[in-house]
Image (tube, rainbow, N blue to C red):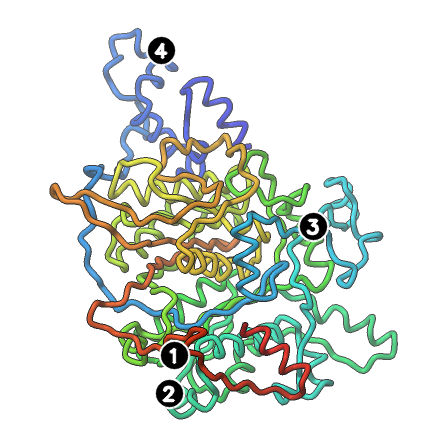
Amino acid sequence: MIVRLNHELANVFGELPKTLFFEYRTLAATANCLASDYSQACLRWTGLDQSEGAAMPLPGPAAALPRRRIAKRNSWEFVAERQTQEPIAIIGLSGRYPQARNLDEFWLNLREGKDCITEIPGDRWSLSELYHPDRQEAISRGKSYSKWGGFVEGFAEFDPLFFKISPRDAANIDPQERLFIAACWDLLEDAGYTREQLSTRYRGQVGVFAGITKTGFALHGPELWRQGERVHPYTSFGSVANRVSYLLNLRGPSMPIDTMCSASLTAIHEACEHLLRNECELAIAGGVNLYLHPVNYIELCAQRMLSADGRCKSFGKDGDGFVPGEGVGVVLLKRLSQAIEADDQIYAVIRGTSINHGGKTNGYTVPNPTAQTELVRAAMEKAGIGARSLSYIEAHGTGTELGDPIEIAGLTQAFRRDTQDTQFCAIGSAKSNIGHLEAAAGIAGLTKVILQLRHKQLVPSLHAEELNPNIDFGKTPFVVQRALAEWKRPIIEENGTRRELPRIAGISSFGAGGSNAHIVVEEYVPPVDVERRSVVVSELQPALIVLSAKNEERLRERAEQLL
């Protein structure tokens, strides 16, 4: 309906924002916008331009309504650089994503612009009875019109005895929970921490914040019981976080978070807030998402959310929905001052986080660009930076005809409060590579940003050879990143002097029910007075590293992983 309304109004007003009816929810507010921003067109439309009253505003309630205006600033004017809170250091990182069992493989896929979407694997469920290519027919018959997704290989692999869990108990635990446990162990190995250190040095004051939203594992129970299996599969969101705390003897906050597709970024926001309130000394935060039953696809298709051709066209032409994706990712967080004091590795720093809700909109799953604007502004203000300091945005970018324009409208309004400059900030979305990971989408985007910071490169966003015609990128601060390129630090001119800024990125994640999250991440540049304790290793100056494993095969595998 909104597409048709936009088309009709274009005949009168010419080019109008495609997001007009998302920004103004009532006819009075819409009329007021048109009367104030397109007054001449309104006068021509009503014939008042040919009468004595041509110079007068339109009559009626619309002319009396106050309309909030955003003050325009000089293009090089910045929000005062002020740090309102201590940054949070990211000192550990782990994850698994479609066609990537580790982050090295994930980076390779991103750098090469690889589309990791495949047909649904046979070890999930059979397509023969559950798939129909015709959208209407599939929905009417309770089937899926999509047969594509980004899937985690070996999603059910788990070593229960390593974690001192009985195999029978492990078989009942949702694979999402098992995957999250393994990712948390990898995370601590990456950061160089042991269970003993967490219990002694930090007195167990470590929080666990887990984003998760998918169910369906328990639905396999009845069929397995008919086959005589003595199993009781279940999904418990609380257990995803609680079991990590239990296994690692952690006594900080332990909570699952389900805000739909913004769950993992919201988990990171909560972790940062708890650290800043001294409610824990370390925090594990992230999310997990698996599609374990065909009902997940059937429900999404019933809401017409999925792409019909298996491509997630973030900011591209003909975007008709998202492609489901799987993955798990976690970060280990600590206050920056404490991380420097402990000589931790620091991947990047979180300068600011923000969450909010879109409130009442034109529909339960319809986003609110104004709320997204306020969300981004709040994170920037916490970070103490202006829009011109940002050089990359990892967008939500689900690849829908009007969802993407709404996101660009919200971002543009947020940036316009600082600068009128155009096309200075790159934008992209990992969804174009791996699909929409729902609860794990935010952590996937953050991981992509961290890897880009590490390699000082911006990777291509796929399926955007032709851009969404509903977005005029030339009038926005953004350029879709469509090729591998160096991530250059921005240079700004201020009071006649040129200054180099660090690489700073924003990451957005929006839940279908209106829950929004945004974080601002900056590359870590060690202070000049901080010297890291390091050992130079070379062929002439080798180092001895002791490895252990349960048998020779595993020992060789561990050595290959380290290599």
* 99 in relation to 242, above or below: above
Marks 4 and 3: CB-CB under 8 Å? Answer: no
On residue 202, the disc is 2
Q: Position of residue 64 (x, y in %)?
A: 27, 31
User: Residue 496 or 418: which is nearer the viewer?
Assistant: 496
On residue 47, the disc is 4
Marks 4 and 2: CB-CB under 8 Å? Answer: no
**Residue at mark 3 to residue at mark 1: CA–CA distance:** 38 Å
Q: Earlier in the sequence, mark 2 or mark 1?
A: 2
Left or right? Give the position of 403 relative to 73.
Answer: right
Q: Earlier in the sequence, mark 4 or mark 3?
A: 4
Q: Helix or strand or loop: what does disc 4 sit on?
A: loop
The amino acid beneath tag 2 is Tyr
Q: Quadrant of residue 562?
A: bottom right
Q: Where does label 3 land, which residue?
A: 148
Number of dots carrying numbers: 4
Q: Position of residue 2 (x, y in %)?
A: 52, 33
**Residue at mark 1 to residue at mark 4: CA–CA distance:** 67 Å
User: Visible in this render: residue 398?
Assistant: yes
Q: Position of residue 442 (x, y in %)?
A: 48, 59
